[in-house]
Each structure stands twice: as C-alpha cells, then as structure tokens.
Amino acid sequence: MPLLVAGSVAFDTVHTPVAWRERVLGGAAVYFSYAASFFTTVKLVGVVGEDWPDTYTDMLQRQGIDTSGLHVVEGGETFHWKGKYLPNMNDRETLEVHLNVFGDFQPRLPEAYREAPFLFLANGSPRLQSSVLEQTTGPKLVVADTMDLWIREEHDALMALLGRIDGLVLNDAEARLLTEEENLVKAGHAVRALGPRFVVIKKGEHGAMFFGEDEIYVMPAYPTERVVDPTGAGDSFAGGMMGYLAEQREVTPVTLKRALAYGVVAASFTVEDFSLDRLRQIDRSALEERMAAYEQMLRF
Amino acid sequence: MPLLVAGSVAFDTVHTPVAWRERVLGGAAVYFSYAASFFTTVKLVGVVGEDWPDTYTDMLQRQGIDTSGLHVVEGGETFHWKGKYLPNMNDRETLEVHLNVFGDFQPRLPEAYREAPFLFLANGSPRLQSSVLEQTTGPKLVVADTMDLWIREEHDALMALLGRIDGLVLNDAEARLLTEEENLVKAGHAVRALGPRFVVIKKGEHGAMFFGEDEIYVMPAYPTERVVDPTGAGDSFAGGMMGYLAEQREVTPVTLKRALAYGVVAASFTVEDFSLDRLRQIDRSALEERMAAYEQMLRF
C-alpha cells in the first residue's frame, strides 16, 4: 500500500573523526523514502531550492519513489545541515543549520497523495506535521517523529499532534526531555500517556525500545564494525519499519515487531557509508539476508 | 558442577539520585556467588575483616555457597567502596575506596576448591587472579573480569593472564581502553586477539555483546523501570552466566548463548534493589519466568 512521507530534504555536510563529506544528499524524508522503497511505493512531500540537482530526483524516481510532491522553489536554496560526530560515533554536534526553503514550507499535497493509507510525519515543526495530516483522508496508520527543538519551543502544538497520531518515534534524549523521566521504560510509558497508541524510542548504537498497549520490548542494533556515518540511521529505521507495515497492509503486534526489526536492519546499512551510498548498493535480498542473521542472533 | 569464584567481598556505600545505603553487603565475588547459586554449588574465595558479621556468612551458606575459602583477618577491616550514581543511573563516580584487607590479599585455596571445573576470576589484580588460577588443577573453563585500574597499571600481568584464560568479561569503557578501539565490534575482536577464546562486553543498561570464534551477537538488557541500584549488575550477570554453564557441565555455542541470557536476567533482578536485597527475594522459578519473557521478547 502507498506510504506517504513529509519532511526535510537536505544537503548535509558531515564530519566524522576519520572522514568528511560536503553537501551530500540527506534529510529525514530522503533517508526514510529510500529505506521504505525496498518494501512499498513511497510518496514524498518536501521542498528544495534551485540548487537541487535533477539527478537526485531521477535517482529517487528510479527507486520507485513518487516525487510529484517535491516542490522546487525558484531562486531558493535547499535546507543545509552541517554536523560533526564525536569519537564514539553516536553523539553529534550540530555546527550549522540553514533551513532555507524548508523554513517557511507550506506543504500542499498532490491530489493523488491524499488517500495514502500509511503516513509518516518525519521530523519537522508540529504545525507543518499537522498541516500534512489535515490534508489526508483518514490514513490507516499515522506515525510521527519529533526533536528537542519542537519539544522545547512548540510544546502545545506538539501535544495537540500527539493526540492525533497512532505512533511516535523519537530518540532517547528526546523521550527524556519530553517526559522528564530518566529511566527509558518509564519515559516510554509516559510518552504513550500523552496520546500515541505506541511509542518507539531510538537508542542509536544501542537499538530501539517499543511501548505498546500490552507489551514493551527492546531490539538491539545489528552489530557492525563499519560505522562510517550515522546520519540518517533513525530515519532509515523509520523507513524500514513503515515500509514493511505498508507492504503487509496491516498493523498488528506481530507485523509491528517484525517492522521494527526491518527498521534496525535498514539502519544498519545506512551507517556503513555516507549519505545514501550504502543503501544505494543494496537490494531487498540483502535486507532479507541480514534480517535472517538478525533473527538468528536473537535466538537462544 | 562446582564453580569457584575469587574476588572482592565488600561493604558498599551507595548514593543514587533518590536514595542511599551505608555499608551494605557487596563485592564482585558476593554478587557473583549469589547469582550463580541459583544454578550450582559455588565455592567462594575472598577476604574480610573482623567487622564482617557472621550473619552474612550464614546467609551465603544457606544459599549453598561454600565459604570455607572466605578468610577472616583478625584485627582487619573489610574492603569498603563508596560510590555515587549519576541521574542516568548507568554512570557512576567512585567517591572512596578503602581496600583494607583486600589490599594485600594472598589467596590460599582450600584443598577441596582446587579441582573445581569452572573458575571465575572476579575483578582483582591480575597477579591475584593468576595466583588463584595457579592453585587449581586444570579447570574446564576459566573466565576473568578486569577493570581500568589493571589495564592502566598492571598491563603486563594482565596480558599474561589473557593468554591463560578461556573468556574475558569486561565493560564497554574497559574494552575501549584496553584496545584503543572506539567501535565496540572492533574492540571485541581486538580483545579476543589478546588471547581469550571468547569475550563478553557488558554495556550496562544496554545489555551485552558476545565475541566468539565464529559468531558475535548482542543481547539487550531486560527492560525494567525499577532501577534502584545498578551496583553488582555486571557481577550478577557473570554469576548467572557461569552458574548456568557449570550446571550444564558443557560449554558449547548453544549453552554459552543461553548462559549470557541467564546473565542478563540475573542482572535485571539485582538492579531492582540495593545490595542483594532483590536477589534474596527470588528463587530459580522467578529467574525461569523472566527468562521465558526475555526469550519471547526477542522473537519476532
């Protein structure tokens, strides 16, 4: 089933302790779309400037991603993020953020997008996320991501959004900030109490935790020694997760759990190179192979 | 089969963000012994001072722990550790260390201890660990723990020990320090290259990683919202692991993996209260129940 995603499309300048890349393809909605495209048709909503190369659009389209919702602003510049990873390759520092055309993005969904049954609101202001949600015609599953900035500065809008979504995906620091609970199990329950039926807390190199009505569980990250650039890992995780759910067409405790595992596996590829470079080398069978290894790893 | 453990027996003064306890029962060998005692007969080697209450010895004995190797130094004082946990309840600061009688402990193994087929060298100086190993008659499995202090200050003795043991258990920071590798997968392989046939890296609230000849895997911690005091979690983990192996009598990839899972489960109880308080409330069936839940959690 079609999966709609709205969020940032960006150029990233990334410094790691051993290498760096300037203005490479990035953005939450891009990582998400690409990871999800292994499973289902993705409809991308985003905005870029005149500096956006058509070759990127072509590349996304070849992957089966519908880019008719990717708005190009004449005379505008694409969102540019610059960051630096600490030696542990898990924590990072944002050096520069140039929102550019993403700053006053007012998304307009193409007609063909509105009935998509699966919706992911990638990290963006809760107002922007709500505006996208309002243009859809009752999706079967709505999941959102958020970040510290919105928790701090658009708290009321975020709270309103939390009452209207099925699932929230956020990282450990964000869950702690949102709930003022240090213990992640308590934090997960507390986020659920704010509205979402389920919550996924991403823990970077330590995997993810799931909180649903009847169960909580933890999934470790797939262990890899080739961690080149963690940028986009969380978005790829969400893409793998939502892509699999859209493919399965139904959201049950069983499909949700497998979906998280596919998310872990998708993220484990993303970190193995800069930008989408590693994801672009793989296909569904590579995902399945690692998924089988991951499943085996957790059996005893 | 009997399991021999040598290491610290201590009084701990523990401060957490919400509570504190003064001079409660602790020490690596104590946590280890108690956790292992659910599975097998444990023979404890350690040293205490005159301030050691007989009631503690009685309590350990009632749990089936052989304390004939627990030496009481007349006029001496028991090892006392004082520490403080940060709000995340994972990182801690050591405030005071009074080694006391443990400082110049020269262990002498009772005759009945020497043939124990399973041996755990809990955290202690590599010289002390080697001295214990030399008094045994060729155990089937020898596993050791270590810490930053020995990595820094007794490097050569530690390297010599690593060539004589089957397995090493250490935490993530120690693995990084020992190998100068930030990536834990690389660090795990690098520790194995120093000698041990297998390596377990403990990651606190994030579980543990295993490195063997043919496989590596990650096991998440069992999620609990009742984290009262993490002291002794790593030693309880090792106790559950070694206890199960001694019970199974054989060390295969299959028993090792289940052993790690039992270690995770044992540790998850330890953190739920100060000292041995939570472990003292449970029995084997409580461990089995949580083990089943843990196994279920990791299936999808």
Image (cartoon, coloured by chain):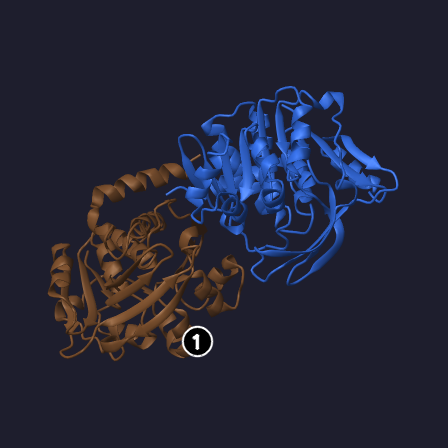
Chain colours: A blue, B brown
- Inspect this view and state whether residue B163 appears: no
Locate residue A280 relative to residue B260 in the image: left or right. right
B67 or A176, nearer to the observer: A176
Locate residue A60 relative to residue B63 in the image: left or right. right
- Inspect this view and state whether residue B267 appears: yes
Which residue, given by chain and number where applicable, does mark 1 sit on?
B152
Q: Is residue B59 above or below residue A74?
A: below
B20 or B198, nearer to the observer: B20
For mark 1, does the 10 Å Cα neighbourhood hold few (<14), some (14 to 19), or many (20 or more) residues?
A: few
Locate residue A43 relative to residue A203 in the image: left or right. right
Circle count: 1
The percent position of residue B13, horizontal first and vertical second, equals: 29, 65
Chain of the residue that carries numbered disc 1 in the rendered image? B
> Hey, which quadrant is residue A52 in on the image?
top right
Q: Is residue A257 above or below residue B267?
A: above
The percent position of residue A32, horizontal first and vertical second, equals: 65, 38
B290 or B43, nearer to the observer: B290
Q: Is residue B262 above or below residue A240?
A: below
The percent position of residue A156, horizontal first and vertical second, equals: 59, 36
Identity, as a three-letter code, of the amino acid under mark 1: Arg
B265 or A193, nearer to the observer: A193
At a point 17% along the width and 56% down the height, the residue shown is: B41
The percent position of residue A99, horizontal first and vertical second, equals: 75, 46
Q: Name the quarter where the C terminus of chain B is drawn.
A: top left
Element class at badge 1: helix
Q: Is residue A242 above or below residue B260?
A: above
